[in-house]
């Protein structure tokens, strides 16, 4: 498996958007708007690949000078639990450190909290609804 940074507007980016729609949006009856995708131009986008096939992805968005937010974590359904997500998180954390960030935050889906806790993230505060499902804020000091 190879991990790499994805540039906005490239064929890899198109595949990343398709993966995120299939895993994160379609099951909720949602799609991305052109405005949402346009806002991603300044994000650090990461993909996990086997040959030319995207297996998973995530992105980092600056929230403050030393804080970055992990967003849009998605792994193909049949590969969940097989190390793709763990590799993406580790790569994202290293990339964040390389860019001078000291903390990663996220809005984690409630059903994914256990995965993130195993990766060293802690729940901060109570549950809230986002994109129609329960989430919690989680964070980790780098």
Image (cartoon, rainbow, N blue to C red):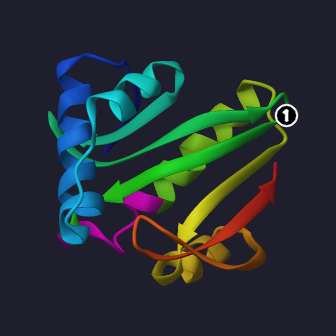
Residue at (84% x, 28% y) in the render: 65
Disc 1 packing (10 Å; few <14; some 14–19; many ≥20): some
- Is 99 positioned to the left or the right of 106 in the image? right
Answer whether residue 7 is visible to the viewer in this image.
yes
The percent coordinates of residue 24 (x first, y second) are: 30, 61
Question: Which residues fall within the magenta stretch?
Answer: 78-85
Residue at (59% x, 50% y) in the render: 90
- Is 46 positioned to the left or the right of 50 in the image? right
Res 136 quadrant in image = bottom right
- Is 36 positioned to the left or the right of 142 in the image? left
The percent coordinates of residue 2 (x first, y second) are: 34, 38
For residue 14, above or below residue 108: above
Q: Which residue is labeled 1 in the image?
A: 66
Residue at (18% x, 71% y) in the render: 78
Q: Tell which of 110 and 53 is nearer to you.
A: 110
Is residue 3 covered in magenta?
no
* Number of numbered discs overlaid on the protein picture: 1
């Amino acid at each position: 498996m190879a991990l790499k940074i994805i540039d906005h507007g490239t064929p890899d980016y198109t595949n990343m958007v398709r993966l995120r729609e299939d895993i994160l949006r379609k099951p909720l009856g949602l799609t991305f708007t052109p405005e949402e995708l346009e806002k991603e131009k300044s994000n650090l986008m990461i993909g996990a690949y086997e040959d030319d096939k995207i297996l998973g992805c995530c992105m980092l968005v600056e929230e403050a000078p030393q804080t970055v937010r992990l967003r849009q974590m998605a792994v193909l359904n049949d590969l969940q639990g097989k190390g793709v997500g763990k590799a993406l998180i580790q790569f994202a954390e290293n990339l964040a450190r390389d860019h001078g960030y000291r903390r990663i935050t996220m809005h984690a889906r409630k059903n994914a909290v256990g995965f993130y806790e195993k990766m060293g993230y802690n729940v901060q505060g109570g549950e809230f609804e986002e994109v129609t499902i329960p989430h919690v804020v989680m964070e980790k000091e780098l």
